[in-house]
């Protein structure tokens, strides 16, 4: 069975975007060499990326640009190389390399994908799919970068979760830029 992981940046008060959908705050601290190395290593894997429509459009609009390739070449190479699946009922087509569009029922499609042979899957951003998948018990691991900022209001990646999720801390790492990486497995 394929593993499904979420990787997201959140604020100290638990939001992955502000009230208007902005997450530019997550890009601060990029001048920390240890954090840069961590980010590059994460992008060097062979997993399959899963997105909701909004995150897909944002990622495809950035990682395919010369600016992305210049500022973060290792991450841009990984993002453009990896297989990607976007879940959307409104997109007509996708154009980012190695991307497929899924229009069926999210939970059914992800259950099928987990049963298939293939690499591990990672959700980036995509709060519209994290909540339902978490609530259905389909996420195996939650990797979170806690950023040293509080927004006061915004959007949680667990919107729509109706029952308590019991999680177990498996790893943590602190960076010089104040960010903290934590990894939890479903208990």
Image (spheres, helix red, strand yellow):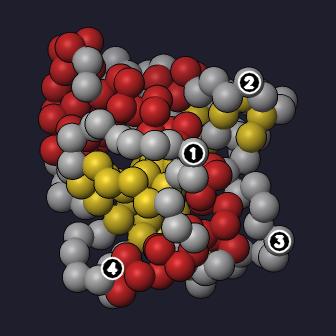
Tag 2 or tag 3, which sits nearer the N-term? 2
Tag 1 or tag 4, which sits nearer the N-term? 4
- The residue identified by callout 3 is 162
Instruction: Say which element carries label 2.
Output: loop
Measured in 3D between alpha carbons, the distance from the residue under mark 3 to the one under mark 4, in whole angstroms, is: 25 Å
- The residue identified by callout 4 is 2
Instruction: Say which element carries label 1.
Output: loop
Considering every residue shown, the one lying at the far front of the view is 92
Measured in 3D between alpha carbons, the distance from the residue under mark 3 to the one under mark 2, in whole angstroms, is: 24 Å
Q: Nearer the viewer, mark 2 or mark 1?
A: 1
- The residue identified by callout 2 is 20
**Considering only vertical position in the picture, is 57 above or below 65?**
below
Q: Residues within 10 Å of mark 1 (few under 14, many from 20)?
A: few
Q: Residues within 10 Å of mark 2 (few under 14, many from 20)?
A: few
Q: Nearer the viewer, residue 178 or 116?
A: 116
Residue 139: where, in percent of width, then height?
52, 72
- Contact flag, marks 3 and 4 (Cβ < 8 Å): no
Q: Is residue 29 left or right of residue 162?
A: left
* Residue 122 seen from this side: yes
Identify which residue is drawn at 21% across, 41% down: 97
Q: Is residue 96 left or right of residue 106?
A: left
Tag 4 or tag 2, which sits nearer the N-term? 4
- The residue identified by callout 1 is 90
Tag 4 or tag 3, which sits nearer the N-term? 4
Measured in 3D between alpha carbons, the distance from the residue under mark 3 to the one under mark 1, in whole angstroms, is: 26 Å
- Contact flag, marks 4 and 1 (Cβ < 8 Å): no
């Amino acid at each position: 069975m394929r593993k499904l992981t979420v990787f997201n940046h959140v604020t100290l008060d638990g939001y992955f975007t502000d009230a208007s959908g902005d997450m530019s705050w997550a890009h601060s601290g990029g001048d920390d060499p240890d954090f840069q190395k961590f980010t590059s290593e994460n992008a060097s894997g062979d997993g399959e990326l899963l997105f909701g429509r909004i995150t897909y459009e944002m990622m495809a609009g950035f990682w395919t640009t010369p600016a992305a390739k210049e500022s973060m070449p290792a991450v841009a190479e990984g993002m453009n190389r990896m297989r990607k699946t976007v879940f959307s009922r409104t997109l007509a087509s996708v154009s980012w390399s190695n991307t497929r569009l899924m229009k069926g029922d999210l939970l059914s499609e992800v259950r099928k994908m987990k049963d298939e042979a293939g690499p591990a899957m990672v959700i980036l951003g995509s709060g519209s799919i994290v909540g339902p998948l978490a609530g259905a018990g389909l996420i195996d691991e939650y990797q979170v970068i806690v950023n040293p900022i509080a927004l006061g209001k915004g959007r949680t990646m667990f919107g729509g979760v109706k029952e308590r999720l019991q999680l177990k801390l498996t790893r943590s790492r602190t960076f010089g830029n104040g960010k903290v990486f934590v990894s939890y497995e479903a208990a």
